[in-house]
Image (cartoon, helix red, strand yellow):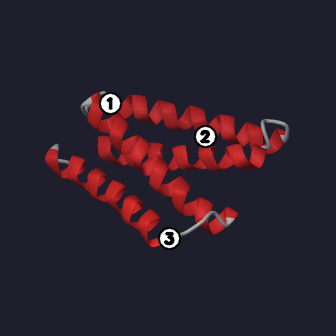
Amino acid sequence: MSWYLLLVAGLFEVAWAIGLEYSDGFSNPLPTLGTGIAMLVSLVLLAKAIEDLPVGTAYAVWTGIGAVGTASLGIVLFDEPISLSRLVFIGTIVVGIAGLHLSTGGH
């Protein structure tokens, strides 16, 4: 169950990171509110996940999900640059997340 909580926490991390762009420096009220809510939900779920998972592993996976999701959505939503090397390095993060999951006996 902790891995599922961690996955959802990571998805909410992506949501708040993308929300930062839409909040326009916290000057746009609705995206700012959504960003704040996503931050809170993400942290609460991370805190629940680390009750059963090693904190270092959970934090690395949480930030990895956030990094992969945010970088991917940045390419799709904000026309950020895409290159083979960028995709390879994003893929490396995914491999690292999977490796941490497997190395802790995650289900």
- Label 1 or label 3, whichever lies nearer to me, is 3
Q: Secondary structure at mark 3?
A: loop
**Tag 3: residue type?**
Ser
Q: Element type at marker 1?
A: loop
* Residue at which label 3 appears: 83
Q: Is residue 22 above or below residue 46?
A: below
Q: Is residue 6 left or right of residue 34?
A: left
* Residue positioned 15% across, 47% down in the render: 103
Q: Nearer the viewer, residue 69 or 92?
A: 92
Between the C-alphas of marks 1 and 2, the distance is 18 Å
- In the rendered structure, which amino acid carries the disc numbered 2? Ala
The vertical placement of 43 against 105, above or below, is: above
- In primary-sequence order, the first of circles 1 and 2 is 2
Say which amino acid is labelled 1: Ile
Residue 17: image quadrant is top right
Q: Residues within 10 Å of mark 1 (few under 14, many from 20)?
A: some
Tell me which label, 1 or 3, sits earlier in the chain: 1
Mark identifier at residue 50: 1
**Residue 46 lies in what quarter of the image?**
top left
Give the labeled residue for mark 2: 38
Q: Nearer the viewer, residue 107 or 71?
A: 71
Mark 3 and mark 1 in contact (Cβ < 8 Å)?
A: no
Q: Work out which residue is located at the far bottom of the displayed protein and give it.
A: 84
Q: Residues within 10 Å of mark 2 (few under 14, many from 20)?
A: many
Image position, residue 72 (x, y; %): 53, 62
What x and y, as percent, mark residue 57? 27, 37
Coordinates of residue 61 in the picture (x, y in percent): 35, 44
Residue 99 in view, yes or no: yes
In the figure, is residue 50 to the left or right of 8?
left
Task: Confirm whether residue 1 shows in the render.
Answer: no
Gap between marks 1 and 3, in whole Å?
35 Å
